[in-house]
Image (tube, grey):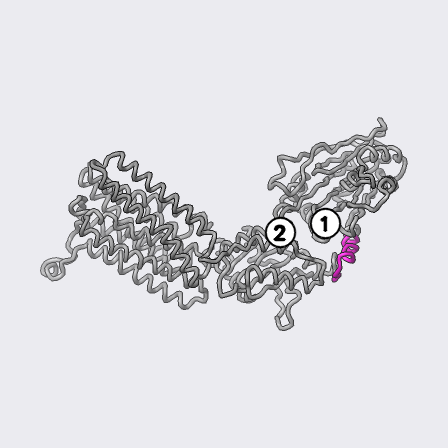
Amino acid sequence: MVYALINIAFALFLGWLAIYVDARTGNEGKNPVISLNVLLALSCGALGLTILSSIAMPERMTTFLAELTYIIFGMYCVHFSVYNVFYPMIERPFAVQVLSWTGDIWCIWAVMFHFTGATVTNFVGIRMESVSLFFDDFATIFPYNWFDFYRLLVFFVVPFFSVIIMLLRSETREGRLDHQKSILNAASLIAAWIALSLVHFATYRVAMFSTLFLVPYVLAQWILMRATLVDFLYDFFSLLGFALKTLICYFFPAILIGFGFAFLWSRSTNHGTAFYLYLIALIIVIVMGAYQLMKLFNRRSGFRTQQYANIFEEDLSQFDFSDDPENIVRNMQNIFTKNIGMSFMRILVENNNEELESVYDLSDEKKITISTKDNKMFDSLLNQNRRIVFKTVLDSGYYYSASRSDLVNFFNQTGSDAFIILNEGRHILGVIILGQKAGGNVYNNYDYEVFSKLYSYFFVFGYYMKNIGNESIVGVVNREIRMSEQIIESIQGNIDPIKNKRYDSGMTMIHAHNIGGEFIDLIKLSEDKHIFVMGDLSGKGIAASMSMVIVKSVIRTFLQETKDFKLLVEKVNQFIRFNLPRGTFFEGIFALIDFKDDTVYYINCAVPAFFLYNRAYNNVMEIQGEGHVLGFVKDISPYIKVKKVKLNPGDILFACTDGMLDSKSLRGEAYGKDRLQKNIIENTQMSAQNMISSSYNALLEFLSKELDDDVSIFTLKMLRA
């Protein structure tokens, strides 16, 4: 009974292992290791049922289940061998699949037609009976049967030669990680054979140990899983750490469970329910303790910590964009080198010819130019949202099957081991390419997680470099005050003014410290419709201004893809959340002005003040209601809704940022909404722009000092029907 439960427990463990490996590799069940786990799990389960059937079921059922065990395990050995021969390829050509199916059919034929019976007892363990391999006189000379032949061929010969072929093939590949994994795969088979020999010797003392002949292959499968997931090169310290982890987390717990089993067995007279309850409780306690230790070890690789994410993020968050462009590239490369230790970094940015071109290269570096027009490699990666690609995963990741040859050419052309695509939707701004890591190590899952987490910083850097390359927004300026003038000029020069004769509009943006994150944008959709956006992005100085310019550009890009007003805001929220530095948020307002219907549709994103002056009542009303800032949540749609206001001749819309309302006088008193509303009523006969000037001058008079915060104001006045 105990041996049956052990086999069933290992079957469940292998099932969990298959799910775990599939989740870690993300290959959606296409990894051959998953199939191997399933086959071995089924064979362990069938062996457990075989032992149980020998207790209370007919002998024919025991024979059938035993034969089923050997058939499935034979299939496991066949697929294990095929996996080794063609490693590290995941996708199998049809001819290879036919070869695997042929091996499966042979296993079924050999067992079903040549095995004659099975016996499971405490005195002999598990014993298979089969017909003689030879007949007549040859049977006397060679007293071997089909079971001996099947076990020798399937358990040992075929796997052995497959491992030899795998090791020979690995010598011809350049990838050191693949070579290391090939050695680990070979080690899994050697470990299984060593453990199998120990089980064989143990059967001389306890015959039923022969029913545990699959347990050594569970060990092999675990090592195979580790080889699949390992993503860094082992050195002395990491091997020592791995050995220590294995001893503490696996070997010692197994010994404790073994001694615990022996102790409970010797203290139990009838081995009843209490015995099994105590045994299960002991196993749970030891396994949970080992799991907690394993979590502790998983935070470290060997004895040396690999957790550089926090320092990397801190360096990126403090990055200074006010230096010369060449120094900016050098400083970014120093940050990467400090935290990752790669051999080199190069920046490719888009030029006017739909090409990616390396910028600010060293004098002895050859310029790299790659076309993005109809580039299948980039199209395939963007379709799968794969913006971070490592050379080491090309052979094992099914995501890259469609563009594997192009990716190999890209890595060879650039001499890199990793690259990061900086894209804005389908538009590629640039690419960061990274050389080999220090010590010849490779980029691993931890690097991927860190790069994904910090992608927003890379995007801002790439956006900045693109504009330097195009000499547009920031040109070649190298000081913040000069940059602020060009950014403001660029923003104002890229606004579609309202030219409807029935409306008058005005706006102003005053930055308290040369530059900031506030902006106003007007975008013409048609003769009858205009988009108005006013907002304030968190942060100060050059970093906030760069985020502001990026968001302004992104809004116009999204308007080319969608005409849905609410969807536009949702997409902007997602962009801020996932593409700008962590913690960046937007507060302001989006408005769609329909001149044909004299209606303004708007979404409040926590704008401080949005007023409507109603001429009929000669009164100013707040109409913004509750709003939610953009950038905090992944999905903003449940928290925002489109509102509308109908305009009549003489009605005025007035919106401003918090710099207008919250600025304080020398006495510490805020300007506030009441003063602003009073000023609006007093100046309704003025033009829209003059109303803004009057409101701003009233603010300055109230403050009696310089502004402490940016102020942006927009006014829309309906003149006539």
Asked if residue 577 is positioned above or below residue 682 in the image, the reply reads: below
Quadrant that contains the N terminus:
top left
Over which residues does the magenta segment extend? 476-490
Q: x, y (%) of residue 239?
A: 41, 60
Q: Residues within 10 Å of mark 2 (few under 14, many from 20)?
A: many
The reply to whether residue 615 is visible in this rendering is yes
Asked if residue 700 is positioned above or below residue 645 in the image, the reply reads: below
Q: Is residue 616 left or right of residue 108?
A: right
Mark 1, residue position = 540
Quadrant that contains the C terminus:
top right
Residue at 86 percent of width and 39 percent of height? 702
Residue nearest the viewer, comparing 708 with 107: 708
Do callouts 2 and 1 mark residues in contact (Cβ within 8 Å)? no
Identity of the amino acid at label 2?
Ser
Residue 503 - label = none
Q: Is residue 594 magenta?
A: no
| Secondary structure category for the residue under label 2 | helix
Residue at 23 percent of width and 55 percent of height? 151
The reply to whether residue 553 is visible in this rendering is no
Q: Quadrant of residue 227?
A: bottom left
Q: Residues within 10 Å of mark 1 (few under 14, many from 20)?
A: some
Q: x, y (%) of residue 23?
A: 45, 47
Identity of the amino acid at label 1?
Lys
Select label 2 or label 1 by which is in front.
1
Q: Quadrant of residue 196?
A: bottom left
Q: x, y (%) of residue 247?
A: 36, 53
Q: Is residue 538 left or right of residue 387?
A: right
Residue nearest the viewer, comparing 360 with 395: 360
| Secondary structure category for the residue under label 1 | loop
Q: Is residue 162 left or right of residue 303?
A: left
In the rendered image, the residue lying farthest to the top is 617
Mark 2, residue position = 456
